[in-house]
Image: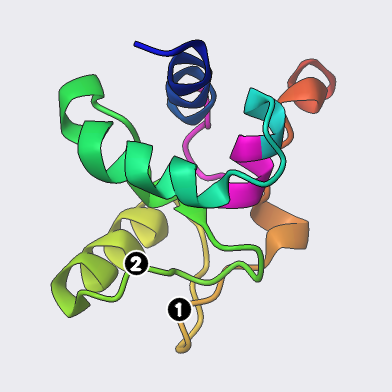
Amino acid sequence: MQPYTRRVIEIIAGIPEGCVMTYGQVAELAGSRRAARQVVRILHSMSDSHRLPWHRVVNAKGEIAVRDEESRLLQTLYLQGEGVAVDDRGCVDLSKYQFWPEMKDQR
């Protein structure tokens, strides 16, 4: 496994219940600011095998970016089950729910 991929997996695995991170945020923390699409590919191909909380990753606007209707509904239900408010457009308030790992010790 490539070091970047390993780091992405570690970051996503570390997102606590009730919080979200953006694809770009994960990419930047893993060391490649412009690799948000790579984060999407890693999530798509490795979520099951690494038991990643895929539902805690949203796009830069706080939107659920999954196009498949069933998966979109599942992500919404998972987030709501963790106490994350998701509006009718599938958006999460990043100012309230976005997780910043470097601040976790201060919470």
In the rendered view, tell whether residue 70 sits above or below residue 37. below
CA neighbours of label 1 inside 10 A, class few (<14), some (14 to 19), many (20+): some
Q: Are marks 1 and 2 in contact (CB under 8 Å)?
A: yes
Where residue 41 sits in the image (x, y, percent)? 35, 45
| Residue type at numbered disc 2 | Thr
Alpha carbon separation for disc pair 1 and 2: 7 Å
Q: Is residue 107 visible?
A: no
Image quarter of the N terminus:
top left
Label 2: element kind = helix
Picture quadrant of residue 92:
bottom right
Residue 1 among those drawn in magenta: no
CA neighbours of label 2 inside 10 A, class few (<14), some (14 to 19), many (20+): many
Where residue 27 sits in the image (x, y, percent)? 61, 38
Tell me how the rendering is colored: rainbow
Image quarter of the C terminus:
top right
* 55 relative position to 19: left or right: left
**Residue range corresponding to the magenta coloring:** 14-27
**Which residue is under mark 1?**
90
Please report the residue visible at 31 percent of the width from the left and 60 percent of the height from the top.
75
Picture disc at residue 76: 2
